[in-house]
Amino acid sequence: VEPLVIAIDGPGGSGKSTVAASLATAMSLPVLSTGVFFRAVAWGLADTGVDDAQVDDWFDRHSVAVEGQLGVVDGVVLTDELRSPVVQVSLSKVAASPRVRSHVLDLERREIERLGECVVEGRDIGSVVWPHASCKFFLAARQEVRLRRRPEEGPKLFERDRKDSIRAHAPLVIADDAFIVDNSDDAVDELVIRMRELIGVRT
Ligand code: C5P
């Protein structure tokens, strides 16, 4: 049998990281937040460009890892940097680069294999990164709720989602076999109970 991998995708501010963390705790599983990879790479590439050659060269010379909500580039831990203006402005462009996505895909898959059973959250986990996930969720929330959760980003959040959704490579999509869960109004605990019931149905 395949190790249990729970995929959670959804737009910014949909509650993915909170829900993923609570679900993982409830099930005693580790959680992988894949957005941290893209944020760490966006930070690393800030002084370079995102031409294919520049991207490949950067990945040749640098190491990227994710530990919880921390990014680690060349052994240096990144925290606040991951939500800094430098990262916010280039994030969508970096995440749309096919070369970046190809390098990050390798890292994501290797990390999931290393973790074994885990909860993974992102934009393309159920569709691209781990299409055979044991159970897939797509989190949704009303716009005003998402805005309230990301006050530092403001309406730019919707612009980032739009770019995530229309990009050519691994756009934000709802996988055919994903459960769509709206969490605008529910308490996280209740949501986790519902999700565990659905995981039970699939596994
Ligand atoms: O989840 P978070 O807001 O940290 O993700 C930051 C950005 O990283 C997203 O807006 C998206 O462009 C990119 N991303 C992605 N694929 C993933 C996770 C994140 O393209 N699996």
Image (spheres, helix red, strand yellow):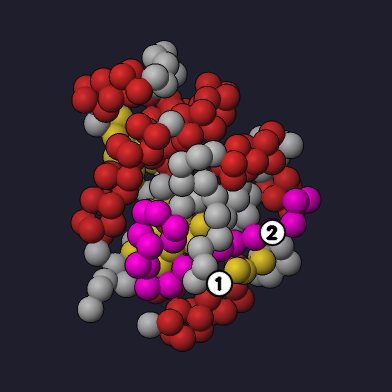
Q: Quadrant of the N terminus?
A: bottom left
Secondary structure beneath dot 1 equals strand
Indicate left or right for 125 with 155 as reference. Answer: left
Image quadrant in which the C terminus is located: bottom left
Residue farthest along the top direction in this orientation: 47
In the drawing, what numbered circle is on residue 47? none
Q: Is residue 143 magenta?
A: yes
Residue 76 percent location from the top left of the image = 30, 29
Give amino acid for label 2: Ala
User: Looking at the image, is 155 positioned above or below residue 174?
Assistant: above
Can residue 19 be seen in this snapshot?
A: no
Horizontal side of 3 relative to 155 (left or right) equals left
Q: Amino acid at mark 1?
A: Phe
Q: Position of residue 60 (x, y in %)?
A: 21, 25
Q: Residue at x 28, y 52 (%)?
A: 109
Horizontal side, residue 2 vs residue 151: left or right: left
Q: Which residue is mark 2?
A: 141
Dot label at residue 179: 1
Q: Are marks 1 and 2 in contact (CB under 8 Å)?
A: no
Magenta stretch: give its range: 126-144
Examine the rendered structure and indicate whether residue 111 appears above or below residue 116: above
Q: Is mark 2 within 8 Å of ligand 1?
A: no
Q: Earlier in the sequence, mark 1 or mark 2?
A: 2
Please count the marks in the image: 2
- Which residue is painted at 59% across and 73% down in the image? 191
Q: Where 96 falls versus 27 (above or below)?
A: above
Of the residues tagged 1 and 2, which is closer to the observer? 1
Write the residue at 51% across / 57% down. 9
- Whether residue 153 can be seen here: yes
- Measured from the top left, where is residue 165 in percent x and y? 59, 45
Q: Indicate whether residue 92 is drawn in magenta.
A: no
Q: Secondary structure at mark 2?
A: loop
